Amino acid sequence: MRILLLTAGSRGDVDPFLALADRASAAGHEVVLGVTREFVDAARAVAADKADGGPPRFEVAALDGDFAALVEAQGVSPWAAARAFRSTVAPMMAAMLRSAVRVALDSRPDVIVHHPKVLSAEVAAARLDRPRVLVEIVPTLTPTREFPAAGITTTGLGPLNPLTYRLAAAAGSVFGGVLRDLRTEAGLPSRGPLPGPARTLVPVSPALLPRPADWPAGTVVTGQWTRPERPAAADPELADFLHAGRVLCAGFGSMADGDPQRRARAVVDAAREHDLRVLLVTGWGGLQLPGDLAGEDVLVRSAVAHGPVLPLCAAAVHHGGAGTTHAVVRAGLPSVVVPFLADQPFWARLLHRRGLAAPPVPARRLDRPRFGAALGALPEAATVRAVAGRMADDDGCGTALDVVERI
């Protein structure tokens, strides 16, 4: 079968699709993975890995747009995004949506599997008369009475919770103009519904978020999509640091809004009060160590491999992205979540409610006293390890691939 995977966004949006591309190609399928420019080289490295000098195991197609450059230019503040919407965000999204249709028409897949950001996938699927599978990276699209849509509110509204999913779905309407143009260019009616997804896949561990009882059968909770991590390059300094004492792994992924030195100061000062050494992972710019805080108890890296590193730490502080949340719990680490935006408050509240994390500290309120108090309220590691044990049984990519093959 020829499978087209389309995704866009940050690393947390791309890594699951990389994992599925890897698994599907290993199962003998022809796979094309469409990613925006900043991830093309990394995706091609995965495709070439273990190729034994032969052709890449799957094809990587470049979508227009660069979300990393956008974050670097304006940060992740929703206010900055609103100010730059007409000048920067809208043109980039329009180019990405248009390029996704072009990649689909060129690759002629049997099925399209796509991220919700790739709104034009439904146009491509209708034009090709092929089924599509929607990947609900976080629960924002399939209504349930059990909790509100991630990113809308963290306050449970009971029977009104399903209404919050309408708000989440309406966000894509701001790109209605470009989608109408693409429909016309594809020879489709410019208005009216197009065929819906054949299935919706939710790459979340049921050990972390049990499947809501009122979700339809067509929505499948698969477990997180992960792939075996490649052995990291030898880093003796990091290895020595991790074995020299209790380590707090601190990283905020692609979050780069506000003052990264102020955040790092709050984290390092509070960690020292709790006799924790700090592995400071700068990511896309969310943390930056002030010169006066340098010391033998702080090690700075731009990125680390979660698989081998997190199990050697005592605790973590992170932004609450879906991928990082899973990685931290899977490693059995208690954590403090510092949510910035979107679905992150959802995961922060979920972890705290499940007894897997301290009370969250919103990014705008992060300071030494609040973070220090959160470190003092970390749950017992045994509680997290119990959930991690159940997550170890997940085969997210295998379950997802089975669904796609049946379609």
Image (cartoon, grey):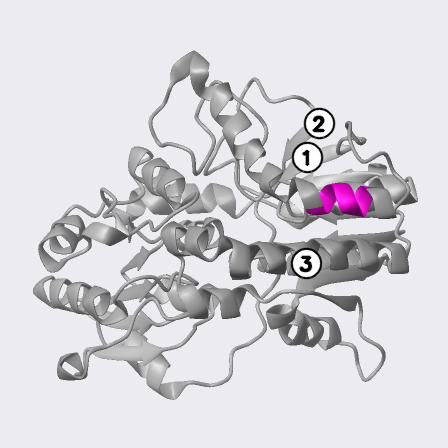
Please report contact status of discs 3 and 2: CB closer than 8 Å, yes or no. Answer: no
Q: Magenta residues?
A: 178-183
The image's mark for residue 96 is 3
Q: CA distance from mark 3 to mark 1?
A: 22 Å
Secondary structure under tag 1 reads: strand
Looking at marks 3 and 1 on the same chain, the residue that comes earlier in the sequence is marked by 3
Q: Quadrant of the C terminus?
A: top right
Residue 399 visible from this viewpoint? no
Comparing 313 with 58, the one in front is 58
For the residue pair 158 and 398, the one nearer the viewer reads as: 158
Residue 133 in the image, given as x and y percentages of width and height:
74, 40
Q: Nearer the viewer, residue 312 or 145?
A: 145
Q: Position of residue 344 (x, y in %)?
A: 39, 46
Residue matched to label 1? 200
Task: Please state if 8 lies on the left or on the right of 368 as rendered.
Answer: right
Q: Which mark is residue 218?
A: 2
Cβ–Cβ under 8 Å for marks 3 and 1: no
Q: Nearer the viewer, mark 3 or mark 1?
A: 3
Count neighbours of disc 2 (C-alpha within 10 A) and say few if under 14, some if 14 to 19, many if 20 or more. Answer: few
